[in-house]
Image (cartoon, grey):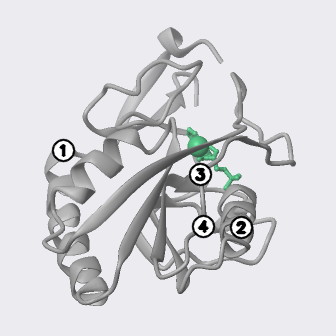
Amino acid sequence: MDIDKKVWEVLCSEEDILNRLNELGTEISDYYRGKNLYIVSLLKGSFIFTADLVRKLDVPVKVDFMTTSSYGHGEESSGSVKIVNDIKGDLKGYHVLVVDDITDSGLTMKSVMDHLKTKNPEGVKSCVLLDKPERRKVEIEPDYVGFTIPDKFVVGYGLNYGDYYRNIPYVFVVTDEDR
Ligand code: IMP
Ligand code: MG
């Protein structure tokens, strides 16, 4: 895909995202009040979402990062998820919330959650900015979803194409000029 020859269509504007962050911040804070919240953010895609989301929480929170293998420079998942960089230590006593940019096939979220469960946490839930349920290959429904979107390749607000465009402050779809 040559991104320069495509049309950008805004799917979630900065305002949409800010409004949803406020709602998610309240909902997540309410659930984790009185619990030891430990956010595990999946790099690189969720770095912007995580940074904005944690600032909407009014409960104590620890934040850590994991890196998993991703799409690379293409649009299709390789099918297997590798943990490139794990979090250190045990999660005993913590309620883990895995934060990712998007759940597509569900393979990443499912394998990360299964992996973290082996570290003895009190519980593991998931939060994603975007959910593409039509693309699911494994059974998983994220606990907190920013926006449910159709089956389109989206970029911006942390999501990349060829490792670029993560800095664009809104989520957009790249559509073919000819379509
Ligand atoms: P899954 O394992 O198929 O659910 O894919 C999850 C990962 O693929 C996400 O963390 C993203 O990094 C990447 N991904 C999936 N769909 C898109 C997209 O539309 N744009 C950019 N990255 C995507
Ligand atoms: Mg990712």
Residue type, mark 2 in image: Lys
**With respect to residue 58, does 27 lie above or below?**
below
At x 40%, y 27%, the residue is 166
Residue corresponding to mark 1: 14
In front: mark 3 or mark 2? Answer: 3
User: Measuring 40% from the left and 36% from the top, which residue is drawn there?
Assistant: 158
Residues 59 and 12: in front is: 59
Name the residue that disc number 3 marks: 88
Q: Is residue 14 above or below residue 108?
A: above
- In this figure, which residue is indicated by the disc labeled 4? 90
- In space, the residues marked 1 and 3 are separated at their CA atoms by 34 Å
Badge 3: residue crowd in 10 Å (few <14, some 14–19, many ≥20): few
Q: Which callout, 1 or 4, points at the residue further toward the start of the chain? A: 1
Q: CA distance from mark 3 to mark 2?
A: 19 Å
Cα–Cα gap, marks 2 and 4: 19 Å
Q: Looking at this rendering, what residue extends furthest in the right direction?
A: 79
Q: Label 3 near label 1: C-beta < 8 Å?
A: no
Q: Are marks 3 and 4 in contact (CB under 8 Å)?
A: no
Q: Nearer the viewer, residue 160 or 28?
A: 28
Residue type at mark 1: give it.
Glu
Estimate how packed mark 2 is, as few (under 14), some (14 to 19) or many (20 or more) residues with alpha carbons within 10 Å. Answer: some
Q: Nearer the viewer, residue 36 or 136?
A: 36
Nearer to us of marks 1 and 3 is 3
